[in-house]
Image (spheres, grey):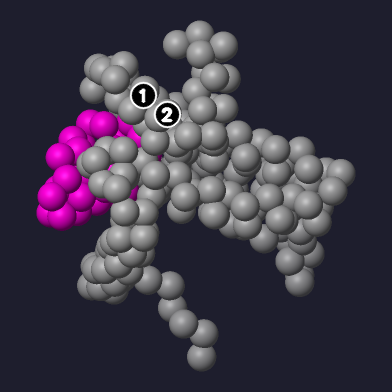
Amino acid sequence: MSFDDFKALVGLSFRDPQAAAHLLMAQDWPVSARWMALFAAVSVSALLASFAAVLFSTPGPDGTQIVTLSRQPMMLAAMQLAAIVLAAGLMSGVGRMFGGGGRFEDALLLTVWIEVLLLLVQVAQLALSLILPGVAGLLGLAAVVLFLWLTVQFTKALHGFRNSVKVALGLLGTAFVAGFVLSLIAAALGILPEMPQ
């Protein structure tokens, strides 16, 4: 994919995300290339988050710097990688439960592409934070809306669904159930943070 192809695909993703999803899937990338794209995307995302944490870090009450997850890029990248793989598995698996025919390999490609698009927003947000912090905050909210919208549209393209409302409700329901199950697993393994007394 050339840089011009990349720019055209980014533009198409915002104008007609389902067409962009079909175009991506039609390219039939090898599975290894999809995994490489995933590792590259989460690595760049973690580095950007780490850079932002250093750039905008604030001292704690005792004068020391507050350590956040974004200051640990390896941990952040691992968590993002796991989240994207889980999202791809849910996108393909739950969709097939409701009559869709999407493959995990295509779902992985589409979730990676969503991450790439959000990376572009993250770069813009980082740049705006230096000159217009208020606008950068609004861009952060827009990124959440963009993520949900793209996920719904890409899920429709992956499985051939037509009703956006049903897909959105399915997405929210799946996220709720997945979050509940993951919290139970985290509690069982003792990795939930302690609640303040």
Residue at figure coordinates x 45%, y 44% from the top left: 150
x and y percentages locating residue 157 in the rendered image: 31, 38
For disc 2, the marked residue is 20
| Residue occupying image coordinates x 51% and y 28% | 12
Report the front residue among 86 and 173. Answer: 173
Residue 89 x %, y %: 23, 46
Residue at position x 31%, y 44% from top? 156
Q: Is residue 163 visible?
A: yes
Magenta stretch in the rendered image: 85-112
In the image, taking residue 95 as reference, residue 69 lies left or right, namely: right
On the picture, is 5 further left or further right than 102?
A: right
Residue 86 vertical position relative to residue 102 in the rendered view, above or below = below
Disc 1: which residue: 24
Mark 2 near mark 1, Cβ–Cβ under 8 Å? yes
Q: Looking at numbered disc 2 in the image, what kind of residue is underneath it?
A: Ala
Query: Principal SS element in the magenta part?
Result: helix
Q: Quadrant of residue 31?
A: top left
Residue positioned most to the front: 162
